[in-house]
């Protein structure tokens, strides 16, 4: 028997189009747009000189006929024509009646036909065709509801009656199938969004260069599969992603491994807590071994970043209220406040400081190379100073009507972002202090931050802007470098914290993560590839003072400061490279990939020992040998 082109032909009047369309969306496979191929004359008519010919071909190629019964369809000549053709050429048992409105009544006394004295929803062409009352679906309540989705029980129950007949399943069995397909669709959508975000940020030039290498393409495919599996089985997702890392230890496969391990490990507990009364800001040293905590009076407390042990204190060289602290890549510690700028160096046994008298400093930031320091002032101006000599090299009014609150250098040192009290953020070309991009947020700007590691192609042009209302916008600042920034294809991702006021958004230096702090909630860490949530840094205890500052260092250390002076430090290596991920995974992934999962998820002729452009490091190789190369059931000790 020849397979029919369509599972069903829906006969309906235009007034019932919403109900007809709803039938095509039920119980579809996750990779298909519809559950079954359905003929709807609005969408399915091919170019045909005779409309009737096209309809009859659609009927002939359909397995079922679904009649949307209503007074409108009962009077419609085309519905009558479709019914007449079906009755002449096909089995009556393949006709499904679905009442959208009007009356359908069976003659209970004679028991051989509908009661046509009261029936208004059926075409007279059906008179005398049924020897027994057929099963028909009542869709009137579903037609009246505004929410025509399977999450609406009224809508769902009505369509289960119809879809169950067509699929050859019971209502309960079909609903179980639909729920399973929903989960697959959600997972597939998540994986697709990650891939789309990756391509949008990565730049097509590098991607096109790498696509001709089969190991890169296979790694991308394995990463996408891992994201698909992740919602239901993080362990399996990590194994699939690890196979992708074996082919290329960066990109989507590594990101999928990072997300899977984050799901397995859960949120991060504090490494230690210390209290520094009166603290207002904090910063990690470049090597992440020390943490400097700034007091409102300018005093600096130095803590060991691994243990919290007190290392010493720095007393301010001049009295005055402090505002901000930053640690340069060469080890210079900068403190800004009402008295201007103070620079500490640690070259000898005793730290030394020099002071530069300037207008009140609200925020500061070192350039990536450490040679320059940007200062944001309360009068709206921005100043660039040479970090070595503390001499001013450039000054301009960045925000004419509002105090400047935040500054950050781009990776190449050619641009600067500044944020203000009125919610404005401006991206400046430093060569001529020219504004190439202006953004307006709804609240005062809390922080601006560029991704600090230019080696990450997926993130090197990202600029994160946080406002005090809890909003964060990440934009592609490279697009703003176009000659006409008003027409540049600026890409942006927006976050909204559910924990009240915003404190800061900081990129981890690897470029793979973005940490977002709000005043009353945990620090949330997102992957910059796809911007999916990775983990939270210890949910605060009830009654804890609001968070007022956030610091990140290298690829694993995070520190938060609250208004009570509590400093909490966390360590989590998931924002590191593939070697850091594999080291973290070593104790969390125990069983090798099973033979069944290997056959199902790995590509045909999958080969780990072929030529790979960038092979994984020793830690990943050992884990891959144990979990991917090992045969299931073998001794992997």
Image (tube, rainbow, N blue to C red):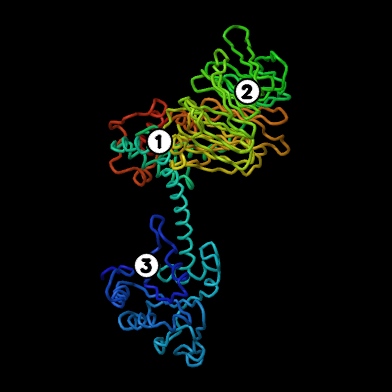
Local packing at callout 3 (Cα closer than 10 Å; few below 14, some 14-19, many 20+) is: few
Q: CA distance from mark 1 to mark 2?
A: 34 Å
On the image, which quarter does residue 205 sit in?
top left
Which residue carries the number 2 mark? Answer: 325
Task: Name the disc covering residue 251, or none.
Answer: 1
**Mark 2 neighbour density, 10 Å: few (under 14) some (14–19) many (20 or more):** many
Distance from disc 1 to disc 3, alpha carbons, whole Å, reads 40 Å
Label located before the other in sequence (1 or 2): 1
- Dot in front, 1 or 3: 3
- Classify 208 as above or below 347: below
Query: Could you tell me which secondary element the residue under label 1 belongs to?
Result: loop
User: Could you tell which of marks 1 and 3 lies nearer the N-terminus?
Assistant: 3
User: Disc 3 vs disc 2: Cβ atoms closer than 8 Å?
Assistant: no
On the image, the x and y values in percent for residue 422 come to 63, 38
Q: From the image, which quarter does the N terminus lie in?
A: bottom left
- Looking at the rendered image, the quarter that the C terminus falls into is top left
Q: Is residue 100 above or below residue 30?
A: below
Name the residue tied to disc 3: 43
Residue drawn at (38%, 39%), measured in percent from left and top? 632
């Amino acid at each position: 028997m020849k397979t029919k082109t369509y599972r069903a032909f829906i006969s309906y009047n235009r007034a019932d189009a919403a109900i007809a369309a709803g039938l095509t969306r039920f119980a579809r496979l996750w990779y298909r747009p519809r559950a079954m191929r359905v003929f709807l004359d609005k969408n399915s008519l091919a170019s045909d000189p005779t409309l009737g010919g096209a309809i009859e071909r659609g009927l002939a190629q359909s397995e079922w006929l679904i009649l949307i019964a209503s007074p409108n369809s009962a009077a419609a000549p085309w519905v009558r024509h479709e019914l007449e053709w079906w009755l002449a050429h096909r089995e009556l048992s393949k006709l499904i009646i679905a009442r959208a409105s009007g009356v359908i009544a069976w003659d209970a006394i004679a028991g051989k036909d509908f009661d046509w004295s009261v029936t208004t929803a059926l075409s007279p062409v059906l008179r005398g065709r049924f020897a027994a009352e057929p099963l028909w679906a009542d869709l009137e309540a579903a037609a009246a509801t505004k929410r025509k989705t399977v999450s609406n029980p009224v809508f769902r129950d009505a369509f289960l009656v119809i879809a169950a007949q067509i699929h050859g399943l019971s209502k309960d069995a079909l609903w179980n199938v639909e729920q399973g397909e929903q989960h697959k669709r959600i997972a597939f959508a998540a994986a697709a969004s990650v891939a789309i975000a990756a391509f949008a940020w990565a730049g097509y030039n590098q991607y096109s260069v790498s696509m001709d290498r089969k190991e890169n393409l296979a790694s991308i495919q394995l990463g996408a599969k891992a994201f698909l599996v992740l919602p239901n089985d993080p362990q399996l997702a990590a194994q699939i992603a690890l196979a992708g890392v074996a082919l290329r230890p960066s990109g989507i496969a590594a990101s999928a491994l990072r997300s899977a391990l984050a799901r397995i490990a859960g949120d991060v507990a504090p490494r230690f807590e210390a209290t520094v009364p009166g603290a207002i800001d904090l910063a990690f040293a470049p090597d992440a071994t020390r943490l400097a905590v700034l007091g409102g009076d300018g005093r600096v407390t130095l803590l060991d970043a691994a243990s919290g042990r007190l290392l010493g204190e720095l007393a301010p060289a001049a009295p005055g209220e402090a505002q901000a602290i930053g640690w340069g890549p060469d080890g210079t510690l900068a403190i800004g406040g009402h008295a201007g700028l103070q620079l500490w160096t640690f070259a000898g046994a005793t730290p030394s400081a020099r002071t530069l008298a300037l207008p009140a400093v609200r925020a500061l930031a070192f350039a990536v190379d450490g040679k320059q320091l940007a200062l944001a002032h309360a009068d709206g101006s921005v100043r660039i100073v040479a970090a070595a000599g503390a001499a001013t090299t450039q000054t301009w009014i960045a925000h004419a009507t509002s105090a400047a609150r935040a500054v950050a250098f781009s990776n190449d040192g050619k641009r600067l972002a500044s944020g203000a009290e009125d919610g404005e953020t401006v991206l400046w070309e430093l060569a001529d202090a020219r504004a190439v991009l202006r953004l307006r947020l709804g609240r005062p700007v809390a922080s601006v931050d560029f991704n600090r590691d230019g080696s990450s192609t997926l993130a090197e042009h990202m600029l994160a802007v946080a406002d005090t209302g809890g909003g964060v916008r990440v934009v592609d600042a490279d697009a703003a470098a176009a000659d006409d920034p008003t027409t540049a294809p600026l890409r942006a991702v927006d976050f909204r914290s559910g924990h009240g006021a915003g404190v800061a958004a900081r990129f981890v230096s690897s470029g793979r993560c973005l940490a977002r702090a709000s005043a009353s909630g945990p620090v949330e860490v997102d992957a910059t590839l796809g911007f999916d949530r990775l983990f939270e840094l210890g949910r605060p205890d009830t009654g804890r003072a609001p968070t007022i500052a956030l610091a990140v260092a290298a690829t694993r250390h995070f520190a938060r400061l609250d208004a009570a002076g509590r400093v909490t430090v966390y360590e989590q290596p998931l924002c590191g490279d593939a070697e850091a991920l594999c080291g973290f995974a070593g104790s969390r992934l125990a069983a090798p990939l099973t033979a069944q999962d290997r056959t199902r998820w790995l590509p045909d002729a999958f080969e780990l020992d072929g030529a790979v452009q960038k092979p994984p490091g020793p830690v990943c190789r050992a884990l891959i040998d144990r979990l991917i190369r090992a045969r299931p059931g073998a001794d992997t000790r």
